Image (cartoon, helix red, strand yellow):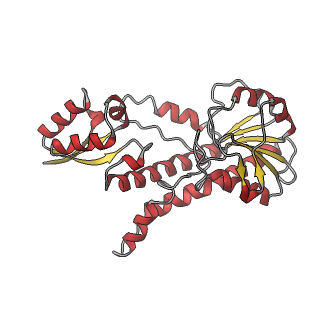
Amino acid sequence: MRFSIATVSLGGTLPEKLTAIAAAGFEGVEIFEADVLAHEGSPAEIGTMVRDHGLEIVAFQPFRDFEGMPEPQRSRGMERARRKFALMNELAMLCDRMNIDVWEVIDAAATKPFGFMKFQPGPGLGGHCIPIDPFYLSWKAREFDFWTEFIELAGKVNENMPYFCVEKLHRALNTRGKSLNGARVLVLGVAYKADIDDLRESPALKVIKLLRAHGADVEYHDSYCPELPEFGLSSVPIDDHRSLAAYDVVTIVTAHSDVDYRAVVHDADLVVDFRNATAGIPSAGNVWKL
């Protein structure tokens, strides 16, 4: 009996695929996002359907709803996601060193006709599931004299991203003959991901802390997070985008959909975009990307 196969390897609806997989003698199945989106049903309902076919879910690839995943797939999914995000973040740093646009590399990889799940680099990981929970598994593994080196390595890469981003801000300012020390910096977005108000483990908080340590005068805008008490900051309005010209650099750390990034590119003197929010927007050479 063969162990597992990915749903993207077959054609048809998800129930048809599961029937074919079970008939072929597989024990497990890897459920991919395209099949989840095409199928009307919750993750729990999909899990029941898989079990009804006598199969086990080996990997559950959609990472937007960890809480909806059945265990132990949730733990496996978090650990895999952590490694994949770390790989993309490390690739971003390598592309920066090689003067290659990492976003063009990702778009090229996405032309693969099947089996591709798009992970994007960024300023770091936030929330609880991906940056924190895998370490529980790492801690438990040590009770059995087992060291989960991939989890530890992924953690190091992801936790280094805010430092890399601040260093890139420094380089961008240097092209204007300026330093971080004394620079006026506007951070766009402080929640850990777009269009939510959750600040847990947000990389933006680390970026702000590092910028202040370098002597920068930091302000932020985030309609979802009006206050940052730990920094004594309140979100500043940007309704009049001409005010962006008052900052030495505007950096996009979290790309909320309610921000007019075209106006940001047009009115800010210097933009450092860590989320590819400015993709496709013409610029006057004033945009730096991750």
- Image position, residue 252 (x, y; %): 69, 40
- Image position, residue 69 (x, y; %): 35, 48
Give the residue displayed 25% in from the left and 31% down from the top: 10
Q: Is residue 200 left or right of residue 165?
A: left
Nearer to us in this view, 229 or 165: 229
**Number of marks present in the image shown:** 0
Give the residue displayed 58% in from the left and 42% down from the top: 196
- Image position, residue 231 (x, y; %): 75, 57
Give the residue displayed 42% in from the left and 66% down from the top: 138
Q: Is residue 6 left or right of residue 96?
A: left
Nearer to us in this view, 10 or 92: 10
Residue 23's place in the image compared with 231, above or below, is: above
Nearer to us in this view, 212 or 116: 212
Q: The C terminus lies in which quarter of the figure?
A: top right
- Image position, residue 46 (x, y; %): 27, 40
Q: Is residue 219 left or right of residue 193?
A: right
Give the residue displayed 63% in from the left and 42% down from the top: 254
Residue 112's place in the image compared with 193, above or below, is: above
Picture quarter containing residue 193? top right
